[in-house]
Image (tube, rainbow, N blue to C red):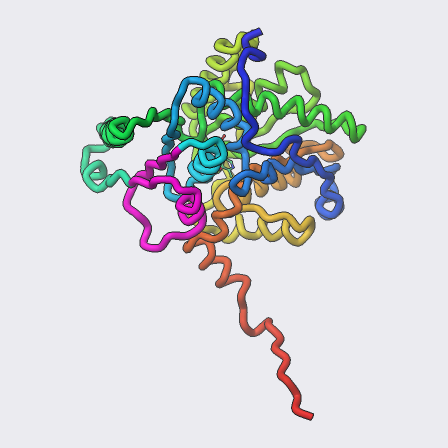
Amino acid sequence: MKLSKHEKVLTGHYPTPLDKMVNLSKKINKGELYIKRDDMTGLGFGGNKSRKLDYIVKEAIDHGYTTLLTYGGPQTNHGRMTAAAAAKFGLKSILMCYGNPPKHASGNIILDRMLGTEICFMDTTEVRQVPAEKQFEAYYKLRDDSTDAIIKRYEEQGEKVYVVPIGGHSVIGTIGYIDAVVEIMNQLKDQAVSADYLVTGFGSTGTFAGLWLGAKYYQVPFEVVGISVAPIDAKKIEDTAKFINQVSQELGLGITCQSKDLWIEGDYYGEGYNIPDAITRKYMLMLAETEGIFLDPCYTGKSFRGFIDIIEKGKIPSGKTSIYLHTGGTPAIWTEEHLKAMEDELWNKDQITIFEYQKV
Ligand SMILES: Cc1ncc(COP(=O)(O)O)c(C=O)c1O
């Protein structure tokens, strides 16, 4: 079978814990709630990109690449994890970001620099002047021209550059989350638990796609639900079904998928991708206060909000056992805009008690 032909390195520590959320289950009181801690994959602060990078890094090393290049926003978790994996396996790394450098370096950017990655910015000022119908094309041109230029520079220095798609979104990267299904099933068996639902964040879609395919391929009893971290439309869901079919075909899994087979929720992205919002922060505090676990304001605060809401609204029927996949991303807490919003809410000086030294 083609699936088992692919080999991987380990950029993380597995299995990640699968824990019952005792206090949160009591609080919500609609069924047993578990958390799968993929924020604890370890390397480079961990997160869901580890499982994708296991396969991607192996392929890069096997084909003699010396440098990993990838894309993302300045706060990309995928970029940080790619840089960490590169460092561990003795590779160089390049991060290509759309836009201009932020005024202050914070969160992932500082971590990227600590990992020794080269950060490049692709100035989109001119692209935004292009008529709307041509903008995608212009973005791709900017990306491709910039990529060609940086690869040329690295190749002149004797390096061979492997281009990792944004979000680690590739067929081999997706195998990481097909594997995760086996890991979860083994843990459920060890804990004598049967789960009905597995809920995950949905961004560049590979995590959801891998879990969905793994769930079908291994015929597990739980349904996989995606919670989008950005606005979605029918086309995005259709594209996800197409991608799932492509992965299935290339790996010889014999599974086919249509949009209507996918459960993806699109109402929990708040104010927009990576924009601070109070409701997401409310859910971040809910998990911190009940279970001592931190979420992030860009991805997991949103997917966790969706997880709780579909349970509270009865979309997941009462009495079922559900697993929330924590996909990491916590360095986003320390980005300027999110930190400021949290400071305004959580650092109310009137609520702080100060004791003074009493002279004897
Ligand atoms: C913390 C975090 N959670 C979830 C996601 C979404 O995963 P995917 O891109 O595989 O859909 C990302 C993607 O960057 C992420 O960084």
Whether residue 144 is visible here, answered yes or no, is: no
| x 56%, y 74%: residue | 350
Q: Residue furthest right?
A: 192
Percent x, y of residue 320: 73, 32
Picture quadrant where residue 306 is located: top right
In this rendering, the answer to whether 352 lies above or below 85 is: below
Magenta stretch: give its range: 92-120
| x 32%, y 54%: residue | 103
Q: Residue furthest bottom?
A: 360
Q: Nearer the viewer, residue 340 or 307?
A: 340
The verdict on residue 162 being magenta is: no
Percent x, y of residue 62: 45, 18
| x 70%, y 32%: residue | 317
Whether residue 313 is visible here, answered yes or no, is: yes
The verdict on residue 116 being magenta is: yes
Picture quadrant where residue 118 is located: top left
Q: Residue furthest front?
A: 158
43 lies left or right of 100: right
- What number of labels is visible? 0
Q: Nearer the viewer, residue 327 or 346?
A: 327
Percent x, y of residue 71: 36, 33
